[in-house]
Amino acid sequence: AQSVSQHNHHVILSEAASLELGCNYSYGGTVNLFWYVQYPGQHLQLLLKYFSGDPLVKGIKGFEAEFIKSKFSFNLRKPSVQWSDTAEYFCAVNTYNQGGKLIFGQGTELSVKP
Amino acid sequence: EAQVTQNPRYLITVTGKKLTVTCSQNMNHEYMSWYRQDPGLGLRQIYYSMNVEVTDKGDVPEGYKVSRKEKRNFPLILESPSPNQTSLYFCASSLRGQGTTDTQYFGPGTRLTVL
């Protein structure tokens, strides 16, 4: 069965530090890849998505992610985090077999210290 | 404003008392879905609907029912809630169904506690 793995459960950074959150998926076919963010007490919002073309995808709020097909990875990056980036981040995948279900990783909680 | 709404936002109930969580979207989306979020497990799909009168099971459908009589509404029904259904529930919708690049839009969540 397809799965999504996020390596870090909780990341703590100081403001202005660089961020990289890992995401790996297990599926050999065509995938669409998503990063969602959940700010405290709020619903999930899309940060960015990839489905084809340039493997470096830019999203909102200065976030970007790189799709590396050979590594089955879609890591999220931001050069300089802010306190307002404190949130939980979810990587998600959908595929074209088994109905193309949207599968989420376990989530990574990011805490940014001012 | 384009949005997905859920009600109630918070609910505390007792084992066995039937409840319904409503979900409504105003974007004319064909696809709607319910997820539950549990610590360390991320979001898991409960049920989904590709269009009116078309529903199917997700990963964790046991103990839940859904219906899709109208395009905009997709209620989640717990006929006999149990404590292991204590969770945070999200409704989501997208223009088309799964296997597409369409973004899923999420509701604000319903925090359910079953005593």
Image (cartoon, rainbow, N blue to C red):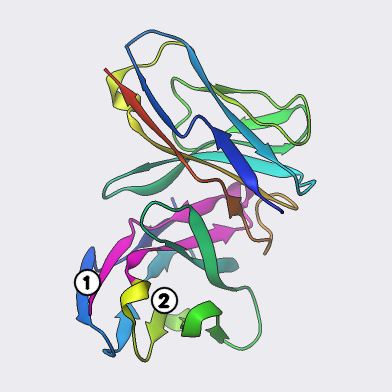
What residue is disc 1 on?
A11
Horizontal side, residue A46 vs residue A114: left or right:
right
- In 3D space, how far apart are the residues under numbered discs 2 and 1 (Cα atoms)? 19 Å
Quarter of the image for residue B88 reads: top left
Residue appearing at x 40%, y 61% in the figure: A39
Is residue A22 visible in the rendered structure shown here? Answer: no
Horizontal side, residue A4 vs residue B55: left or right:
left
Residue A101 sits above or below residue B11 on the image: below
What residue is disc 2 on?
A73
Residue B28 placement (x, y as % from top left): 80, 46
Q: Chain of mark 1?
A: A
Which secondary structure lies at badge 2?
strand
- Which residue of the protein is positioned furthest toward the top in this rendering? B16
Residue B48 placement (x, y as % from top left): 61, 37
Residue A23 placement (x, y as % from top left): 37, 71
Precedes in sequence: disc 2 or disc 1: 1
| Mark number, residue B7 | none
Is residue B7 visible in the rendered structure shown here? Answer: yes
Residue appearing at x 58%, y 59% in the figure: A95
Question: What residue range appears in magenta?
Answer: A86-114
